[in-house]
Amino acid sequence: MRDILDAVAAGELPAAVAEAELRGYASTGAGRFDAARTDRSGIPEAILVDGKTPEEAATMTAAAVETTDSALLTRVTPDHAEACRARIEGRFPGAELAHDERARTIVVHADGYEPPELSATATVVTAGTSDAPPAGEAAVVLEELGATVDRIDDVGVAGIARLFDRLEEIREADVLVVAAGREGALPTVLAGLVDVPLIGLPVSTGYGYGGSGEAALAGMLQSCAPILVVNIDAGFAAGAQAGLIARSISTARRA
Amino acid sequence: MRDILDAVAAGELPAAVAEAELRGYASTGAGRFDAARTDRSGIPEAILVDGKTPEEAATMTAAAVETTDSALLTRVTPDHAEACRARIEGRFPGAELAHDERARTIVVHADGYEPPELSATATVVTAGTSDAPPAGEAAVVLEELGATVDRIDDVGVAGIARLFDRLEEIREADVLVVAAGREGALPTVLAGLVDVPLIGLPVSTGYGYGGSGEAALAGMLQSCAPILVVNIDAGFAAGAQAGLIARSISTARRA
Amino acid sequence: MRDILDAVAAGELPAAVAEAELRGYASTGAGRFDAARTDRSGIPEAILVDGKTPEEAATMTAAAVETTDSALLTRVTPDHAEACRARIEGRFPGAELAHDERARTIVVHADGYEPPELSATATVVTAGTSDAPPAGEAAVVLEELGATVDRIDDVGVAGIARLFDRLEEIREADVLVVAAGREGALPTVLAGLVDVPLIGLPVSTGYGYGGSGEAALAGMLQSCAPILVVNIDAGFAAGAQAGLIARSISTARRA
Amino acid sequence: MRDILDAVAAGELPAAVAEAELRGYASTGAGRFDAARTDRSGIPEAILVDGKTPEEAATMTAAAVETTDSALLTRVTPDHAEACRARIEGRFPGAELAHDERARTIVVHADGYEPPELSATATVVTAGTSDAPPAGEAAVVLEELGATVDRIDDVGVAGIARLFDRLEEIREADVLVVAAGREGALPTVLAGLVDVPLIGLPVSTGYGYGGSGEAALAGMLQSCAPILVVNIDAGFAAGAQAGLIARSISTARRA
Amino acid sequence: MRDILDAVAAGELPAAVAEAELRGYASTGAGRFDAARTDRSGIPEAILVDGKTPEEAATMTAAAVETTDSALLTRVTPDHAEACRARIEGRFPGAELAHDERARTIVVHADGYEPPELSATATVVTAGTSDAPPAGEAAVVLEELGATVDRIDDVGVAGIARLFDRLEEIREADVLVVAAGREGALPTVLAGLVDVPLIGLPVSTGYGYGGSGEAALAGMLQSCAPILVVNIDAGFAAGAQAGLIARSISTARRA
Amino acid sequence: MRDILDAVAAGELPAAVAEAELRGYASTGAGRFDAARTDRSGIPEAILVDGKTPEEAATMTAAAVETTDSALLTRVTPDHAEACRARIEGRFPGAELAHDERARTIVVHADGYEPPELSATATVVTAGTSDAPPAGEAAVVLEELGATVDRIDDVGVAGIARLFDRLEEIREADVLVVAAGREGALPTVLAGLVDVPLIGLPVSTGYGYGGSGEAALAGMLQSCAPILVVNIDAGFAAGAQAGLIARSISTARRA
Amino acid sequence: MRDILDAVAAGELPAAVAEAELRGYASTGAGRFDAARTDRSGIPEAILVDGKTPEEAATMTAAAVETTDSALLTRVTPDHAEACRARIEGRFPGAELAHDERARTIVVHADGYEPPELSATATVVTAGTSDAPPAGEAAVVLEELGATVDRIDDVGVAGIARLFDRLEEIREADVLVVAAGREGALPTVLAGLVDVPLIGLPVSTGYGYGGSGEAALAGMLQSCAPILVVNIDAGFAAGAQAGLIARSISTARRA
Amino acid sequence: MRDILDAVAAGELPAAVAEAELRGYASTGAGRFDAARTDRSGIPEAILVDGKTPEEAATMTAAAVETTDSALLTRVTPDHAEACRARIEGRFPGAELAHDERARTIVVHADGYEPPELSATATVVTAGTSDAPPAGEAAVVLEELGATVDRIDDVGVAGIARLFDRLEEIREADVLVVAAGREGALPTVLAGLVDVPLIGLPVSTGYGYGGSGEAALAGMLQSCAPILVVNIDAGFAAGAQAGLIARSISTARRA
C-alpha cells in the first residue's frame, strides 16, 4: 500500500485512479488479483479459469476472498471446482461456495459478506436449451451484482408462439440479456417488441458455415432493430454491463 | 445439328442427353447460347449481363430469341437495355421487350411466343425495400416459367405485426421465396409458421461485420427452422428452383 | 393448455398460430419440446443431440414420444442411443426404436403410431462414400415424412460414366438431394441434366484450403446451373425441405 | 386501421403488439414507414439512406413526418439532403430540417413537434478525428431521444494523458458511447476507469490487416474489461440503445 | 557487366547463376528489367502493368526490347497500349507490336526477332465467355513460348453435352489449361477424362459467397480428380508453366 | 459389365469414355472402386483413408487389388495398415505390401504385377524435416507411376547456401515437386533458378496467422516467379500430376 | 498549459507523463495535434491524410509547425499537397515543404528548424518497383528522425543474383526495412544472411487469393527466419521503429 | 567441409555466404541442423519441437550441442524434455540442461560453453498471467543471446494504474517485448509512453470472434502508436530480434 501512496505523492499515479487502488492488488504466484476493480469500474474482476491449473485457480480465488470477501470464477471445470472448494474450506471458515455446473461458475462469499442489492430487474432470455451455459454465466454475474434476475427459457423464433406466450413477463424487465445460437434471430425479433436496453449474447452452437456462433454474432451486429452485443459465449460481459445498467436505474430509483 | 446427330450415332453423346440438344446451340461472337437448356433442365439459360458489353448482351439476346423465341437477361444496366431494345426492334418485328429497372431484368417474347402457364402460386416475400432488386429478379423468372406470382413486401421481423398482418395471404402459396438482408431473420421466423417449401434469398445489404449479405447468408444456413438457401442476391437461382417446384405441383394437379 | 387458450381469448396469441399449439409443448428438465411443430410447419422438431448429455437426450425423446407418438434424433453417438433405448423400453411398451449408425439418427415410433405416406419419390444421391452420413440423415427424415426414398451412391464427377450409368434412375425422382464433399461439383453437373427441384448438400470432407465442406458449399452457391443449398452436413434441413416438396406434389397428385 | 382492429378482434394479432400499431404504417411507393416503432420499442425508425435514391429518401421522409411529426435519416449524401429539403419545405410549412454533414444525418421536426427531454446525460467520446462521423450519428440519435449529450473528442490512448485530462468530465456521464478505429483500444482502457454502462463503437478506419474497423471490432469484443459493442460504424445502434439506457435512468429519477 | 564478372571472380556470385546474368539487367527509371530471366528459368519476365503509369510501362517495354528483342505485357489498358506503341515506333523501327484487347496483353517483337517454335500442343479450354481474358493471357504466353495453341471455348459443365462434343479434340493436347469461374467444376470433370497434365485456372467471376473466383479456386484445390492450380486470373502463370511442360515434351520429341 | 455395354449400345454412354470402363467398377460395402481410373486419366484411384474405418479401408484395398493388381492408400494410420496387411495376406498370396510410416502411405502389388517404368526423373525437394510427410506421399505416387524419383531434403531459404549446395542436382530433374511450410518461399526462389515445370506443395506447418499451411499456399499462389500449386498437404495431387508430366516426357523420349 | 500543471499539482496526471506534455496539444477545428509525441515516444505524430479534406490536412499541418517547427504527412494526394503548400507559404515565411509524390509524403521544416542527426545507418530494401511507395514512406520518416538512409531497390528473390550482387552493401546497415509484395519472400531470405535487426514491410500488391498484401504479411509472420513485421503498406510504422533502433545505436555510439 | 570448400573454389557458393558455413551442417536422421546460423544471422537455430517425436528432438539436440556446444528447443512437452535429458546426460558429460516448463523451452550448455554477454537490457512485459508462456520463450532466447532480461508482469490496461506503477522500471529498458492476448491493447498504450524500440507479441488467448490471438495481432498491426509485431505466440521471433537490437546497442556501447 505504501508504494501506491508514494506514487500518488510523487504525482506518478492520478489521484482519481489511485483512490480505488488503496485496497490493493493481491499478488500471488498465479498472478495479481485486481481487488480494486469493483470500486473503480463497478464490476468485480472475474477469474477466467481457461488455461489455468486447478491449483492456480484456487490460489487466485483465495486472493480474491482475502481482499474482497468474495470471488467469482467463470468457465470452471469439476477439477477446478474441487481444488477451489478444498482451498476455501481450509482457509476461510464459514465461507459459502456455490458451484453452478451448467453455467460453469463458482461464487464464494466469505463469512459475513453482504452482497449488494439493487432495486432493478434483469431478465435473461434464451432461445433454446443449448444457450443455457453462457446465459447462466450472465445470470450468476447479475445476481452477484445484486440485480433481481428473472429467467425466460426456450422462446426461440422457430416457434414464435412460445415468445408471445411470455412477452408480458419479458416486458417487465429493466434490462434484457438475450442469448441465442444458430442464426441468433431472437434478440432482433424481441428488440422490435420491447422498449428497454437489450443485450444480445451470441452462443457457439451450430455447425458448418457460420457455426460456432459466428452467424449469431454477425446477425446481432447486423440486426435491423438496433441492439447491443457482446462476444460469442461472453456471458460475463453481458451480465456485467447489464448489471451496470441495473445499478444505474436502481440508484436513480432510490434517489 | 449434323455433328450432334453424328456424335449420337457414334455413341459419343448419350442419347438421353442429346435429345434435348437437337434444337442446338447458337454460336455467336459473344459466346454460345444453350438453347436446349429449358428442355433439358426446365430452366431457361439466363444471360447474366455482368462483365458483358451492351453489344455482346444484344448479340446473345438475339441468339436466344432466334433459337427459343424468348430471352431473359439479369443484372441489366440502362445501357444494356438500350442496346438490346435496338437489336430486337431491328430484327424481330412484333417482339415484346419488358425491362424491369428495379429487378434489373429484361424479358423478350418473339411474336407469337406462348409462355408456359402453371396451376401453382409462388409468393415472393421481402423484409424491406432494399430487398426489392433480387426479389424482383426471382419474380420475373417465376413469371417467365408460368407460375402465378404473389408479392408480399416490407414484412421484416423488426416490426413483427407487419408479418402477422399478412400471414394468411402468405400461407396460400405453394412455394415461398423470402428475401432479406441485414441479419436475414425473416425466413427463419416464417419457416416456423408455414408448411410449404421455403427458399431463403439473402440480400447484400448492411455494412460492417457480416455486411454485404454475409450475415443473412450465414443466418439462413444456420436457421433453427430448416430452410433452403441460394447465394447472396441470387434471385435467378431462387426463382428458377421455385419455378421447378411450382411446375412439379402444377403437373401433379393437372394429372 | 389452459394458458394458451386464455392467451388466445385475450388476443395475446394469434389464433392462426395458436391453433397448432393446442397439443402443447412438453416441458422437461432438458428443455421444451415443440410438439406442435409438425402441424404448424410440416416438419417435426428434430432433437439435435450435439451438446446434450445422454440423459438429456433421453428425456427429450420421451417428451417427444409422449406428445407426438414419435421422435427423431440427429447426430447421435452410441452413448446417446443406449440411454434413449433404455428410456423408451422402460416407458413406452411396444415402441420401436431404429438407430442408424452411419446416419447417426434415431427414430422412435410409439405402439400404434401410423407414419404418413406420400405419393412422391425423393432420391438421395452421393458423390462418394464419405458423403454417406449427412445423406443418410436426409434419407431418414424423408422416410419419416412419408416419401418413397431412393438411394444412388458413388456417382461423383471424377468418373463421370458412373453418373450417366444411373441417370435414367435419377430422372425418375420428384425431388433430388445431392450430397458431395471436396469440390462439390456433382449437384452442378446433375442440375444441367434433370428438370426437377434439386437440393445440394455440401459435406465436410477435404483438407487444406476450402476443406471441411467450405469449397463444396461455395461451389454449390456459385453453381452455374441454379440449385438450392443447405448448410454443410445439414442432412436434416435438406431432407425436411425435400419432404415438404414431396408432400406438396403428393397432395396435388391425390387431389 | 380497420384491418388491424379486425385482426385483433379475430385473435390474429396480439393485442399487446397491436396497440402500438394503431397509429399505423405509412405505405409509400418507396416502402412502408413503421410509424409505431417508437411506441413499441422506444426507438424511432431511422431511414437508412444507403441504396435509396434521393427521391425515395424524400418520400420516406415525408411519410415519417406525416405519421410521427418527425424524421431521422442516416448516411445522407448532399443529394439526398437537397431532395429532402425540397420535399419538406413544399409540404410541411414551419418544419425544421437539420442536416449534419459530418454525421451524415438529417433530422426533421414538424411545426409544433415537441421532442422528448430526459434527465440523463449520455457522453460520446472519440479517440481521434476520423471517428467523428459515426460518433456524430450516435449523438444526433441521442439528442433526438432527449438525452443531454456531452462530447469528448481526441482522447485516444496513443497519448494517454489526453484521456486523464478529461476523465472527471467523462465520469459524469450516465452512459458512454466510445468510438475508436484502428486498434480500438480506447473503450477497453476507459472501461477500467468508469462504473457506468459503456458502449464501444468501432470505426472503419485503418488499412491492411484488420483495417476497415475489423481490428477495432475484434478488440472490443475481446476486451479484457467487459463492454457492450455495436457493429462497425453503427452510430445509430449505439445512440439508440444508449438512449434507452438514458431513458430508463431518467424515468427512475423522475419517479 | 563488369560488376557481375568481378563478383564471380571474387566468388560472391555463384557461377552457375551468374552465367545467365551476363546479358544483364536493364536498369530504367521505372525499375530493373530482368533480361536473363528467360535463359535462367525458361520464362520471360512479363511486365505486369497493374500500378504502373503508361510512361513507366513504355520505359520498361523499351528496356525489354533493348535487351531481349521482345517484350510481353499483361493487364494492359488502352492508355498503356498507346504509350507503348508510341515508344516502340519511335525507337525500334520495324518492330511489331500486337495488342490483344480481350486478353489485355501486348507482345513486341523487334525487327529480325525469331520466336521459339515447339513441337507440342497446349490447349486452352474455357467454361464460358467471361473466362476469356485470363484464358487469352495464358494463350498469348504459350504462343510467345512457341507452343502450338488450340482454343476450345464455352464447354462448361452446366450443359455437359457441350464438353463431350469436343472431347476428342481436347484429348489431342499435350498439356491443358482449363479456365473456369463461378463454381469452377470444369477442370475436375475434365481431369477424369484425359491423361495429360492439366492446369486449372480459376476466374474471378460470380458474386456473393465464394465470388471473385474464390469458389473456383477452392474447388480446384479440393478437386477429387488431382489437378494443378494457379491463382485466380493468373493466366500468365498458367501459360508460362504449361509452356515449360510443352518445351520439355518438345525437347524430348526432337532428341 | 453387361450394363455398361448395353448403355453404349443404347447410346447412353459415350464410347470414348466407356472404353476404359470395361474393366469395371468394383462395388464393395465400403464404396465403389474406380478400376478404370488409370486407363482413363493416367492416375490410379488412391484410397484416401481419412474418415474410413480400418475394415472399410481393407475392403477397398482388396477391391483395388482384385481389379487392378495394385492399390495405393494415403493418410494411413497404423490401425489401417494392420487391417490392410491382414486382408491382403489372407486373400492375395505373394502380394507385396509396403507401408511408409512417414509418408502415411500403403502400396500393394499383387503377385506378378509389373509396375510401369518411365524414362524421366521427378525430383521432390523439401525445405525442412516437417515437410517430409506430404513430400513422401508425392514421392510414393511418382514411384508407383514409374518415374525415377530423386529426393533433396532440408534446403529451405533461411540458410540459402544449403540450396546452392545442391542446385546442380536439382537442375537435373525433368519436373520438380517442392514442398514447404511456414512462409513457403522455397518454390519461389527455386523457380527463378530452374527451367523445368515446378509444382509447389504447401505444407500445414506453422502457427498463428497464416498457420496450418495458409501462408505457404497464399505465397505460392502469389509467387513472383510463376509456379504451379496444389492444395495444402496434397502430396497425392502433386505426385500424380508430376507423374503425368514425367510420363509425357518419357513417351516423347521413347518415340 | 495551466490546466495540465493544475492536473499535475492535483495528482491527476502522472508527473512522468505530464512532463512531455508541457509543450501542449494544439487544438484545431480538424482535431488535436499531439505536439509532445516526439518527446514522449521518440516518434513525431504523423498526420495521416486518409479521410481528411485538404483544408483539414492544412490546418493540422499548421498546428504541427506551430508547436514543433516541423510536420510530417503521409498518404498525401496532390490536392492535399497544394492546400498544405498554400497554408505554409502564407503563414510560415522561410519554411521548407518537401512533397515526395512516390512516397506520398510531405515534410515541412520551419525556418531555423534543426533536424536531428544520428550516427547510424538504416537501409531500406525493395523487392520490386511497386514496393516503392511504402518503402519511400519509411525512408522519409527515417530521414526525418536523423538516420543515414541507404536505398537498395529491385532485389526480389525471383532473380536471386540481384540480391547477392548487393549483399555487402546491405550488410553495412545498422537496421533494415525490407519491403516486398506478392509472396513477400525477400525478408525471409535476407534474414538468413544478415545479423542486424530486420523489419519486414508487406506491400499491397498482387491479386487473387492472398492479394492486397495478405500473402506477404502472412509469409513474413510465418517466416522460418525470425523477423519483425508491420502492417501492410505501413511504411510509417516501419520507419518510425527503425528510427528508434537507429537512435538507440547512435546514442550508444556517442556515449 | 570439403564439398563446401570445393563449391567456393568452383564459384558455386558466394564466399561471403560460405564463410560462416565452414563449421558445417550437422546431418541427422531427424533433419539437418544449421550450425552456422548464429554466425551468419546472429540468431541460433532453435529446434521447434512441434511435430517431432521425442527421439527426433533428442537427435537434433545432440547435433546442435555437437556442433555449437549449445542447444535451444521451443514448444517442448514433458516427454520431449525427458528424451533430451536422457540423450544429453548419456553423451555430453558435464553439460547443463535447463527446462522451463512454463515457457516450454529447453536450453543446453555443453561443459565449458561460454554464453555471450551483452551490455544491454531487454524487458519482457506481460498484460496478464496467461501471456506467460510466449513471454517466457522470448525471455529464454534473450538470455541465451546474452541480454540482461527484466520481467514486468500483469500490467494489462484494464487496471491502468498497474502500468503506471511500473512505468519508470519499464523505461529503463533498451528494447521492449510486450506480450498481450485478448484485445492486445497494452503495446499500443505503452508505445505512447516510451521512446525505445517496442515489439508487440500477440498471445493466443480469448474466445469467440477474434479469439486465439487474432484480435491482439490485428490490434497491434493497426496500433495508432507505431510498433513492431511478430506472429501470435511467436516468442522466439520476438526474443531473437530483440536480442539483435540489444546486441547492436551493446556493440556500440563497447566501441
Image: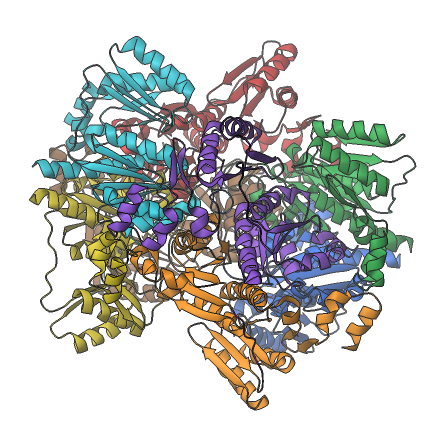
Chain colours: A cyan, B orange, C purple, D yellow, E blue, F green, G brown, H red
- Picture coordinates of residue E225, whole percent (x, y): 71, 50
Magenta run includes residue B232? no
Q: Is residue C212 left or right of residue A245?
A: right
Residue G50 falls in image quadrant: bottom left
Q: Is residue B107 left or right of residue E19?
A: left
Tell me which residue sits at (35%, 36%) in the image: A234
Magenta run includes residue B113? yes
- Picture coordinates of residue F130, whole percent (x, y): 64, 33
Nearest the viewer among A63 and H128 is: A63
- Picture coordinates of residue F197, whole percent (x, y): 73, 52
Q: Which stretch did the figure color magenta?
A: B112-119
Residue F224 visible from this viewpoint: no
When the figure is inspected, residue D218 is found, relative to residue G49, above or below; the finding is: above
Residue F14 falls in image quadrant: bottom right
Quadrant where the C terminus of chain G is found in the figure: top left
Q: Main secondary structure of the magenta part?
A: loop
Residue A16 falls in image quadrant: top left
- Picture coordinates of residue F139, whole percent (x, y): 76, 39
Nearest the viewer among C108 and C99 is: C108
